[in-house]
Image (cartoon, grey):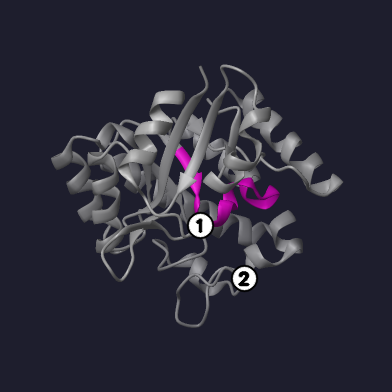
Amino acid sequence: MHRLIINADDFGISREVNAAVCECFSNYMITSATLMVNMPFCDEAVALSKERGFEERVGIHLNLTSGEPLTDGIRCYRCFCGPDGLFNAAFQKNTATRLKLTREESSVMAAEIEAQLVKYMQYGLPDHHLDSHHHVHTDPSVIKVLMPLMKKYGIRSVRLSRNMYRKMSFLKAWYKKRYNRSLARSGVFTTDYFGSFKDFSAVYEDLEENSLTEIMVHPMYDRYGKLVDTKTDMYYEKDFFNRLNAVYEFY
């Protein structure tokens, strides 16, 4: 049977997202969540996970593009932060800096990544899974710095580069395969496939039997108080997830 991980990204970003993630866990709509440790409602998210009994399913959502960094050094570099000291995602919007950073830029980024990993570990959450906001952990300039830190802090599983596409450019497909193979060789656990519900619905018939797929979701409430995925505008209906669980094994 095909197995699914349904992960809620952005846990801790706001009180509303925290509530939406908790509701999804209560209704068996998700199997895991990943925490943004630099966000203002991170402590609340961890407390809720322990109160509701899903703390063993909470990994880290590494963040180098949004909110306030945990370290001061990175604030001085305009490829990471604006004059207000907040992340501006500039490095991630520029192909050159996604591929390569200067030694000084890599150093301050490493310090920020390590600070986020340390904070995650201090919460005592046992999952030790890593993914990232805007998929920055798949950028060459980031993974080069991140890999030794993952080993240092015992990260056991890492999200793949998105690979559920019907069409993509040759260079994009080549890099994704190369990146995913390097993760497998590093010894961390990975799924076989990764993408959104939209990606999954387009290619599910082509996925290998008995494979493991991760689907990312972003639960939030609309103005009427209904659960919705902010990236796809899909409403979360419990019957849909019950039917999905009847066909696929939630992992």
* For marks 2 and 1 on the same chain, the one whose residue lies earlier in the sequence: 2
Q: Determine whether 27 is above or below 100 in the image.
A: above
Q: Which corner quadrant holds the C terminus?
A: top left
Nearer-the-camera pick, 40 or 3: 3
The residue mark sitting in front, 2 or 1, is 1
Report whether residue 4 is seen: yes
Under mark 2, the amino acid is Ala
* Left or right, 99 with reference to 106: right
Q: Are marks 2 and 1 in contact (CB under 8 Å)?
A: no
The residue depicted at 48 percent of the width and 66 percent of the height is 73
Range covered by the magenta-colored residues? 130-142
Instruction: Name the residue located 43 percent from the left edge and 67 percent from the top edge.
Output: 72
Residue sitting nearer the eye, 103 or 20: 20
Measured in 3D between alpha carbons, the distance from the residue under mark 2 to the one under mark 1, in whole angstroms, is 24 Å
Please give the name of the residue rendered at 46% of the width and 60% of the height, measured from the top-left corner.
233
Q: Is residue 172 above or below residue 155?
A: below
Q: Residue 120 at x, y = what percent?
A: 34, 44
Q: Is residue 101 visible?
A: no
As drawn, the residue found furthest toward the bottom would be 83
Q: Position of residue 34 (x, y in %)?
A: 39, 45
Q: Which mark is residue 232?
A: 1
- Magenta-colored segment: predominant secondary structure: helix
Report crowding for label 1: few under 14, some 14 to 19, many 20 or more residues within 10 A (C-alpha): few
- Amino acid at the residue labelled 1: Thr
Looking at the rendered structure, the secondary structure element under dot 2 is loop
Question: In the structure shown, which secondary structural element does the residue marked by tag 1 occupy?
Answer: loop
Q: Nearer the viewer, residue 184 or 85?
A: 184
Residue under the image location 49 percent in, 30 percent down: 157
Disc number placed over residue 90 in the picture, else none: 2
